[in-house]
Image (cartoon, rainbow, N blue to C red):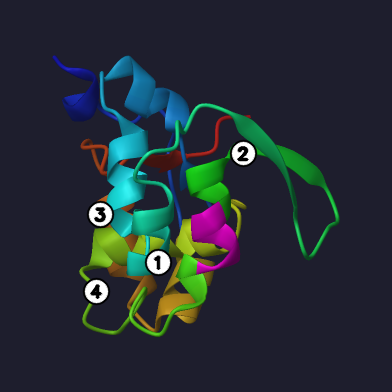
């Protein structure tokens, strides 16, 4: 069974924290840089058109002041593009909205309850989607 179809081994409930597991992208031969570049605003798509994305830079979490190494594309997304009014709307599909919300908060884990509150979507629908057997966009329960 492929990694994208493997059952979640963690029993999930409304308080189970989820996050984007970027290792999942690597293990499934998915180029997350290409996907992240597609989420950039027009200004940053042009700015990063000829720049290599594998050079890490320091990003400071605005809530915890924790310094995390991120690549330039991820930093541009987290510091500018996520703040654009069309980055995350009520019309954004559920899984895409969850993925984008994690980008906006620096991939800080959140439960389906927290995700539902932030996205104004039903928490039980989020839990059924993310806690099921299929992994969407690398969004998985945090493993302790």
The residue pinned by badge 1 equals 43
Q: Residue furthest left?
A: 1
The residue pinned by badge 3 equals 129
Percent coordinates x, y for residue 61 in the rendering: 75, 56
Task: Return the mark for residue 70.
Answer: 2
CA distance separating discs 1 and 4: 21 Å
Q: Which residues are magenta?
A: 76-80
Q: Quadrant of the C terminus?
A: top right
First in sequence, mark 2 or 3: give its number: 2
CA distance separating discs 4 and 3: 15 Å
78 magenta-colored:
yes
Task: Return the mark for residue 92.
Answer: 4
Residues at discs 1 and 4 in contact (Cβ within 8 Å): no
129 magenta-colored:
no
Image point 41% across, 78% down: which residue? 119
Q: Nearer the viewer, residue 21 or 49?
A: 49
CA distance separating discs 3 and 1: 33 Å
Mark 1: which secondary structure?
helix
The answer to whether 35 appears left or right of 40 in the picture is left
First in sequence, mark 4 or 2: give its number: 2
First in sequence, mark 1 or 4: give its number: 1
Percent coordinates x, y for residue 35 in the rendering: 28, 44
Mark 2 or mark 1: which is in front? 1
Residues at discs 3 and 1 in contact (Cβ within 8 Å): no
């Amino acid at each position: 069974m492929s990694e994208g179809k493997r059952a979640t081994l963690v029993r999930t409930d409304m308080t189970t924290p989820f996050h984007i597991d970027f290792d999942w992208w690597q293990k499934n031969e998915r180029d997350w840089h290409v996907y992240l570049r597609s989420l950039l605003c027009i200004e940053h798509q042009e700015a990063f058109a000829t720049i290599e994305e594998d050079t890490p830079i320091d990003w400071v979490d605005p809530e915890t002041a924790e310094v995390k190494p991120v690549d330039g594309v991820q930093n541009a997304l987290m510091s500018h593009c996520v703040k654009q009014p069309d980055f995350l709307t009520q019309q954004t599909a559920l899984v895409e909205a969850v993925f984008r919300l994690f980008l906006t908060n620096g991939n800080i884990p959140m439960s389906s309850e927290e995700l539902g509150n932030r996205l104004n979507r039903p928490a039980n629908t989020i839990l059924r989607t993310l806690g099921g057997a299929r992994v969407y966009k690398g969004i998985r329960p945090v493993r302790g």
